[in-house]
Amino acid sequence: MVATFLSSWAHVRSRRADGWSIGALSLCLLLLGPVVALILKALGDSGGLWGHLLDTVLLRYISNTLVLMVGVGILACLFGVATAWVITRYEFPGRILFEWMLLLPAAIPAYIVAYTYTDFFEYAGPVQSQLRMLFGWTRPSDYWFPEIRSLGGATLVMASVLYPYIYMVTRIAFRLTPASLFEIALVHRKSQFWAVGLPLARPAITAGLALVLMEVVSDFGTVEYFAVETLTLGIFNVWLGMNNIVAAAQISLVGFVFILSLLGLELYARSRQRFASTSRATHALRPLHLDLRGQTACILVCCIPLLFGFVIPVGVLLKFVLTGGLVGNALAIAEVLGGSVLVAGMAALLITLVSTFIVLAATYRGGAALRRMAMVASTGYAVPGTMLAIGVLIFAGSVDRSFAAVTGDGRASLLLGGVGILILAYLVRFQAVGYGAVLSGIRRLPDNMMGASRVLGNGFTSSLRRVILPLLSGSMVAGGLLVFVDVMKELPMTLLLRPFDFETLATYTYQFAKDEMLEEAALPALMIVIAGLLPVILMNRMLRRTD
Amino acid sequence: MLSSCIFRTLRDGLRALPVTLLSLLMLGGIVQSVHASEVNIYSHRQQFLLQPFLDAFTAETGIKTNVVYASKGLAQRLQAEGEASPADVILTVDIARLGEYADLDLLAPVSSDILNANIPAHLRATDGRWFAFSTRARIVVTSKERVADGAIKDFEDLADPQWQGRICTRKGSHVYNRALMASIIAAHGEAAATEWGNALVANLARRPQGNDRAQAKAIFEGQCDIGIMNHYYFGKMMFGDKPEQRDWANAIRLVFTNQDNRGAHVNISGGGVAKHSPNRDAAVQFLEFLTQTTAQQLYGEINFEYPANPSVEPGGVLQSWGSFNRDELNIEKLSELAPSAQMIIDRIGW
């Protein structure tokens, strides 16, 4: 990372001091600050704990994490790519409805889904109760039923709420694939999906998959509740159980290295492959009409992820809200909603601006080094939230101390204890989301777009304003909305870094959910989903306009 | 229409990026202002459990309270904030967490006659950096139907092979079980504790999972016959507003263990004054308030916990469960042994 920085700095120095490159580089450094703070923490002495960890739990943590990554990766790809394919390629009843509803699971925090699934699938839940009634079983020993609190359960839960990341980008990729290519496949009796759709959508799928896997590595709520021993769970055992935050920081870097090497692999694979221009199709791709059996299959493909990712969890939450009679809390929750929307809105705005700035600078001003730097700067997403929050704390602490030294007031503070540190933390964590969205937007623009505008006499900034930005607007807004939804449901960082007496819907939900008081947690959890609805619908409209 | 409006905002924002960044950061600075006669609390205890205490304190003293609740990382926040920290009071559950604050030197010694008189010596730090406010016993619960009364008396009995496939617990690395393991180490040494742990794990009916309530539920459903839980969950299930949980509570019998030897393993909720507390007097006043009769009884009423102040009688429901002997091991010992306990838990795979 340091090498990347140095080489990109050397690169900047070798050209004239360009405001865009320097600005983007400084922003990347700001984004990396908390991660670097965590790395510095990890350099401390862990008191010889690694021998014990290697002997006992570490291999289990790593293999569980890998199995979970592979499982969620496969299932989320299956859900995301299959739905994106049938939505773009076929005509069937309900297609328009499914198109945006398939994005909805993105608005539900995974740990809430884990709670609701437990309620739904456990021994006393409706599924097993019905089965017992149906078959006349009376005891748990009478039959076998898969345990939901398990690695498999965690895989299902995470894939069900994370597949929209893949669905969203893959759908755009399918839609932008020139229709003529599909026709060629038809003529040659090759599969449109395997021979054309999938290969051309691969960069998009991997981009979505990267986000999904980063979420998997950093998830704590779900694995804790299901008692699946992943690296993240191990981090907390070492930190809180053995009072050893140095070793905890070291383990979290192991997860971080997982992600970095995956990203590296993908970069390598992509560097050996050139994709033909997938710019505007010469004529629009028309969805194909299907017979009844085909239509049923399409509906089924869309229903399954929606059932697991939305209908079951929201149904369970609704049941609690309706039977709980807890509408009395509504006033308190309305206040909390305000706080949530405020910080999520601020973070979404800021992240969109920062990632657009970085992407523009890296694409049109910086060299390959700055582009790599920008990518590295968006990996905060792969560090578990609480650990990243500690990195943010250490970083902000040193900023504040410098500030206090300058002002001469020992109690002066710029970041800590205010909303500023929360926004900084969101920026570091969710930069990946905004950056990914804007980057995929700019990749779709023909390379010579900027050149053409400059030749026509526009300056650089005027070309950006008149040509590039309008074409990027869809991706920017989509990225911003996704960040908004992500911040709305973010828990561990908000919990730790927030100012006094400040609640978001996620933290408000958590204080009840922590004790499995699902009835009390249901209404605020449902509000997170409802607050995510509008962004999801807007996002869908932006996605549709990309063609 | 809406999206183009959003886009325009974004485009204008991009031009003003530096100003936006700076003003957002400044906003953080403005939000934070310290008033007189306030107490700022960092709490590991959920807000809704804490609120009745805060209301009573404000009603009695007129001092306003502000709270940040988080389950983990508050010690690191306090550490990062250093001298600039606005925090006055730290409230935690579990002694090992208090130990973490003490280790990082984040707490200030307090010498208060009221606190020293109200809290017995084994429930507070020798240097006055922290105090217990309530105690909770870790107990064994057994199925009323399937386990004979008196069949289990001590935690040590859970290692008996006759219970093979009949015990349910939450994960060993949870603070409650970690402290329990620490108490076993304190009583028998590491080797014997490992042996006990191995035998317990061999007796488990299912992979450790869920929280304490989930163990009672599993007994009710017949998945297992014996569980480990904190005593107050029984009260919460029995007297909460959820009828199904009352059924779980009715299916189990409470066993306060080790009554014929060292006494039941207890843990505490507690707290201390932050090292750089800007409102130190009010902070001490708040701690004193928590050890006096009104607050001490609240612990029982709200969460079925036992008062740490021996001169305060536990409330009606708690009294009806009978009195019991507690392990009077200096509670600090549990915190010291927590890392060893976690290592054993890793080794035995609990």
Image: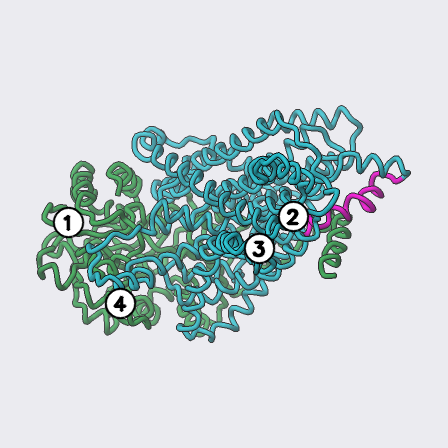
- State the predominant SS element of the stretch in magenta: helix
Q: Which residue is mark 4?
A: B235
Q: In the rendered structure, which segment of residues is drawn in magenta?
A: A458-477
How far apart in space, not on screen, are marks 4 and 2 (Cα)?
47 Å
Q: Looking at the rendered structure, which numbered label has been put on residue A351?
A: 2
Give the percent coordinates (x, y) of residue A84.
Answer: 57, 48
Which colour is chain A painted?
cyan
Say whether marks 4 and 3 touch (CB < 8 Å).
no
Q: How many marks?
A: 4
Q: Which residue is mark 1?
A: B158
How far apart in space, not on screen, are marks 2 and 1 (Cα)?
54 Å
Residue flagged by tag 4: what amino acid is it? Gly
Give the percent coordinates (x, y) of residue B239.
Answer: 28, 72
Residue flagged by tag 2: what amino acid is it? Ile
Q: Residue at x 43, y 57 (%)?
A: B43
Quarter of the image for residue A271 reads: top right
Comparing A510 with A87, the one in front is A87
- Front of the two marks 4 and 2: 2
Q: Looking at the rendered structure, which numbered label has been put on residue A485?
A: 3
Q: Disc 2 or 3, which lies upstream in sequence?
A: 2
Give the percent coordinates (x, y) of residue A53.
Answer: 34, 33
Tell me the SS state at disc 4.
helix
Q: Tell me: A139 left or right of B176.
A: left
How far apart in space, not on screen, are marks 3 and 1 (Cα)?
47 Å
- Front of the two marks 4 and 3: 3
Which colour is chain B painted?
green
**Disc 4 chain ID:** B
Q: Looking at the rendered structure, which numbered label has been put on residue A77?
A: none
Q: Are marks 4 and 2 on the same chain?
A: no
Query: Is residue A310 visible from the viewing direction of this image?
Result: yes
Quarter of the image for residue B194 reads: top left
How far apart in space, not on screen, are marks 2 and 3 (Cα)?
13 Å
